[in-house]
Each structure stands twice: as C-alpha cells, then as structure tokens.
Amino acid sequence: MTRAGAKPPAARVCSHMARTSPILPLLLAHEPLVETYGPVEPDRPPVEVVQTFGPIEAEYAAIRKGCVLIDQPQRGTLVLEGADRLPFLNRMVTQELKTLEPWRSVGSFWLSRKGRIDADLRVIALPDRILLDVDVHAADRTVAGLSAYVIADDVTIKDASADWHRVALHGPQSSTLLGATAQGWRDLGEGEALPICIAGVSVIAERRDSAGAPGIELFMPTASARAVFDALMRAPKPPKPAGWAAWNIARIEAGTPVYHLDFGPDALPAETGVLDQRVSFKKGCYLGQEIVARMHALGHPAKVLVGLRVDVPPEFNAGRVGADDPSQDAPLPEPPPQPISGAGVWADGAAESAPPLGRVTSSTISPMLGNRVVCFAVVKWGSHTPGTRLLTEADGRRLGAVVADGLRFV
C-alpha cells in the first residue's frame, strides 16, 4: 500500500475479459506507476491499473478543486436486452427496479442462494437495454448466475466488458469540462444518465459521486476510447490524469466501500455498511431474499463494516524522516492483500494476547480531516456503535480508534 492510499484490491475470481486498457499506451507517456489489479494467471492477461502519475497530493487536490480523469479497466459492463429485461432483473436483485425509468441508475446486490454477495452492481436503465456495472472479476459469474434463471423470459445477458471501455471524471469542474467537449451535455443529478457525443463517438455518461465530489462515469466503445481520451485532453481546461491512489483517499473520505476490498463474495448485505443503499425491504421476492429479510426482521449480522478515526499521538513521528509533513509520514493500519485480512482491531484495553474482534479493510490519511488517519474495518456486532473506543495497529504499535457515525467521514 502506498502511504496515501491502498493498492487496487486483489480479487480471487478472474474474468476471461481481463485486458489491457486501450488508452494505457497514451497514459504511459506520463510515466505512471502501474500495478496489476487482481491475480495474475498464466493463461489470462492481467488488468493493469494506474496507481499514480506523480505526487498523489496534486492528483487528490484536483479531485477536490478541479477535475481528474481516471482510467478504469477494472470495471466490467454487462448488457441485458429483451422486452422482459427489467421485470426479470427486478426478480433477481436486491433493489426495487419497477420504478427505474430510462436514463436513471441505482446500486444493488446480486446474491447467491445463501444470501452472499456475488456482485455489487450499478444498474443503468437505457430506453432499449440495461447496463450493469460490475467489478471485472465478477463479470463471468454474474452472467452465468443470472442466465441460469432465464427460462421463458425475453431477455439476453451478455458480458460486454471487451466492447465497452470505462473512464471516470471526478471533481467540481467535471461538468464544465464536458460542457466544452461533449455534444448534448447538461448537468446531471446523482443517479442520472445521459447520451452524449465526444469527438463523434456516442458515449453514455452517468453521475456517481463516489469520491465526495461530482463524479461522471463514461461508458464508450473500446475501439473509440483513444479518440474520446484525446478530445478530453484537448479541452481548454483539460482534466488532470490521476490514478487509483488519489481516488482511494477521496472515496474513503466519502464513505464508499469497494467490492473485493471492504467486502466480498463471502459477505452478507447486512455486513457491508451500505445495506440501505443497495437493498429494498418493500419489493417482492428475489434470490437470497429470505436470508436478508430474516436477518433484518429478527436479528443482526455477526459483523459489520464501520468507519474508524485513528488516534496518532504526536510522539509517534518524533525523529522520523519527514515528521514535519504528517501527510507523508502518519502511520497507516495496513489494509489486506486479500479481502478482510488486514490489521487487527481489538476492544479498548485488550491484552496483547487477546484475539482481534475485527480487521481493517481500507485506510488512508485524510487531507480533509487535517491529515488524520481514517479506516474502514469489519468488526464484531456490539463493537460497531458510533463512539465505541477500539484499538488497531500500525508499524508494530497499538493505536486508539473511535467508531465513526457511518462510513462517510467528510
């Protein structure tokens, strides 16, 4: 993990659609740090994700004050077509979709029969089809799982990850940039989508503020991704290329957990900290609903994702190189190389030999909070209440931490 943000999560499930970004050769001209997203398998090409192009502080500042462009080859795109696509999908996933109008989007889960999260979805309704945004390593199993329930429905489900490329714009100037480069652009509210044209290429734009600033997800044909990138970079005020590390800082501050990092295929919806954003308790049946409803009505999960504010005493950095710059030197509880297996979390006052009651899943130094260390962690139920004092560890030392009121820090 870099000192300012976590590495892209290492996923256990690999998709045959894993690929190199079509604009990576253009990005390499800026000499970025590039790392592999997910596992490397001999017979499958890896997904390469830019971590940073240089000083992370400059990229993060552009998210907060300007506009950044982030390449997203780690995102997969599924396409549902057919007259029954919306009612079929509504019977499958956790969110209510009956009222989802064209050019609107919403988050949801696709669950296994045991109520575990097979995919964290973004559902984007178009007039003639539905797009599902998923982690690229969840694309195969999502297509296979959904397709198994198509019986007499007029619906086709395709993994179109190779056909669609994804980039995101984040920052308060994102709308201004698109206004100068895209035909048909207008300001969007959260959860709205819009067809636009950039450099003669048909692009779908969707508003999603995952970094605590206006965010625009762009879906474009892979074959035309370079043309779109070139047009955006030739704008009067072009975006600053940025990588995972800067976005990671901003998304933790904004309370945005990531599938395969903060929760994964073994998690129940009630454990994620985003239950209310993904699950409707008023809709009809869907796969895994009985388990979700029973837990909601009669009990609670054994563990849950929470936000932690970590106490870093001034003497921690005394005498260390760069101690006058806490943004570069504050200790971070290490997140996991695999889901839910990072630094331990203990009850306040726990003995050194006591087993942990949870694990840190993501951590960062927050510029918006005066360079305070903040984390996401999965902890046992009963230790999740806001204000609860806990312990975590960094650089071999126990540090105090306080459970925040929700996942969002700023």
Image (tube, helix red, strand yellow):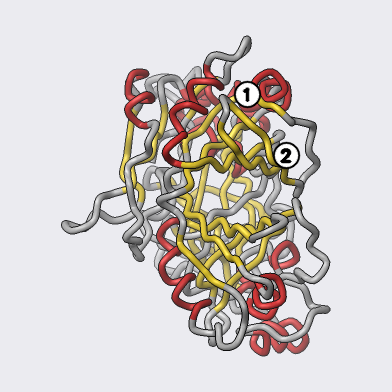
The reply to whether residue 368 is visible in this rendering is yes
Calculate the distance from the C-alpha at mark 1 to the C-alpha at mark 2. Answer: 19 Å
The reply to whether residue 270 is visible in this rendering is no
Residue position for label 1: 67
Q: Are marks 1 and 2 in contact (CB under 8 Å)?
A: no
Is residue 179 rendered to the left or right of residue 113?
right
Say if 305 sits above or below 168 in the image.
below
Residue in the foreground of this view, choosing between 345 and 53? 53
Residue in the foreground of this view, choosing between 312 and 67? 67
Q: Secondary structure at mark 2?
A: loop
Quadrant of the rendered image containing residue 212: top right
* Residue that lies at the very extreme toward the left in this rendered image: 42
x and y percentages locating residue 394 in the rendered image: 43, 46
x and y percentages locating residue 322 in the rendered image: 42, 19
Question: In the rendered view of the protein, which quadrant contains the N terminus?
Answer: top left
- Amino acid type at circle 2 is Val
Say if 336 sits above or below 242 in the image.
below
Residue position for label 2: 410
Say if 141 sits above or below 222 in the image.
below
Crowd rating for badge 2 (residues with CA inside 10 Å; few <14, some 14–19, many 20+): few
> Which residue shows up at 56% across the image and 88% down it?
151
User: Mark 1, mark 2: which one is toward the viewer?
Assistant: 1
